[in-house]
Amino acid sequence: MRAISLCLHDVLDVERLRPGDVYTLRLRDFCEHLSELNQRNPAVETIQSRREWGKTQVPVFLTFDDGAAGAYTFAADLLEKQGWRGHFFITTDWVGRDGYMDRHQIRELHSRGHVIGSHSCSHPERMSRLSTQELLREWKDSCAILADIVGCQVRTASVAGGHYSPRVAAAAAPAGIEVLFNSEPTSQATMIAECLVLGRYSIQSFTAPSVSGAIAAGRRWPRWKQSMLWDVKRVLKTIGGEWYVTLRRQFLSRFMPTQQPPRP
Amino acid sequence: MVIEFRTSAADLHRACLRVTQSDSMAGDENSALFTATSQKLGILVKGVSETLAAGVQIAGTASVPLTILAGVVHVLPYFGEKTVEIGFSRGKMRIDTTVFHNRGILLPVRAAVCPGVPRSETERCSRPDILPSAPGQIRVLL
């Protein structure tokens, strides 16, 4: 199976983002991204609507991590105007906190046809370093909370922090997760245990709308560029280990306060 | 790939579902046998079998752990395709371009090539109860 999935986080109606806030899109930019996607005419759909025999086009999945309030306030409405639906991956410990969706909003998104999935309970910095027991707890507890909110089983999830390993997927399957999105920029699906693992291309504040359109249209060059950068980052993560995480944390706390876990 | 065939995704899903949900699933065996012959695919799990039409390019038999079969049942609908190309080699099952890696995927018989299709790589017989035979035929000693 091939699928092109785009990974977004928050959308804010502001003129200027805080310095270094790469994961948030300005509303104006987000509209341009959607317009560009619309012009390329990709098969934007959800993983649940994919469950029909006879689809031929490579699907494009739009995903929003963390459960940020902006994804509910702006992104969902704008997707619906295009006749599209998205995937919203919720960090359950952050539900109802300042800047994040509450239970009512999550339920409403589900009833409007969007896919609600897990993004772990606590958003661990390095999910791949958790023990199997901790991974199981992150997936099972978050899925149970979301199932309680939306009233049906949650079958999709995305890996928090981008630190993925096959163990992360293997632990997701017992929680009933059938489709797991990670952050590896690839259109190729893999299969771990009983879990279908799909990669995603990241759309950040500096990503030009033409690039997201080209990625959705299946152009190779922008996808290859992301893939190369990801490989470099993977080497740094492997060599740097905890140092990489510490440096990243310091960078985030200095320049990206909105990306820090919200206060209870 | 040592075994290769093309079949309807919906039919394959239904067949896998039937054999995995059968009452006789309580047995000890933990694997399913996929047997691709001239234009048919047979799936055998603990005495329960399903047969469906398939365009077989490279015939043969593969033994697949039930956990993988359960995975196929779960994820195949997400593929959304009308037909899928299935391939087996040692430790791998491929559906279109998606590969399932599992050491339990075995190719107990020598791959037999359909007439007119060039033979690909062959596998050594790893199960004494299933012997290689002439191309296009599979002999299972029970």
Image: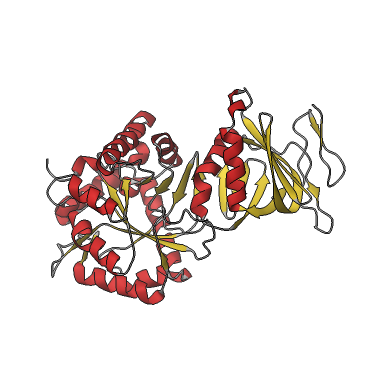
Which image quadrant for residue A132?
top left
Query: Can you give x and y, in whole percent of width and height, for residue A135 in the image?
Result: 35, 34
Query: Can you give x and y, in whole percent of width and height, for residue B37 in the image?
Result: 77, 47
Res B121 visible: no
Query: Can you give x and y, in whole percent of width and height, for residue A254 in the image?
Result: 15, 53
Above/below status of A114 relative to B51? below
- Which quadrant, please, contains the C terminus of chain A? top left
Query: Can you give x and y, in whole percent of width and height, for residue B59 in the image?
Result: 76, 48
Above/below status of A236 relative to B16? below
Res A156 visible: yes
Please state which of residues A109 and A163 is positioned toward the viewer in this rendering.
A109
Q: Is residue B13 left or right of residue A228?
A: right
Instruction: Give the residue drawn at x 31%, y 74%.
Output: A35
Which image quadrant for residue A70?
bottom left
Q: Is residue B128 left or right of residue B92?
A: right
Instruction: Give the residue drawn at x 29%, y 65%.
Output: A80
Instruction: Give the residue drawn at x 60%, y 41%.
Output: B16
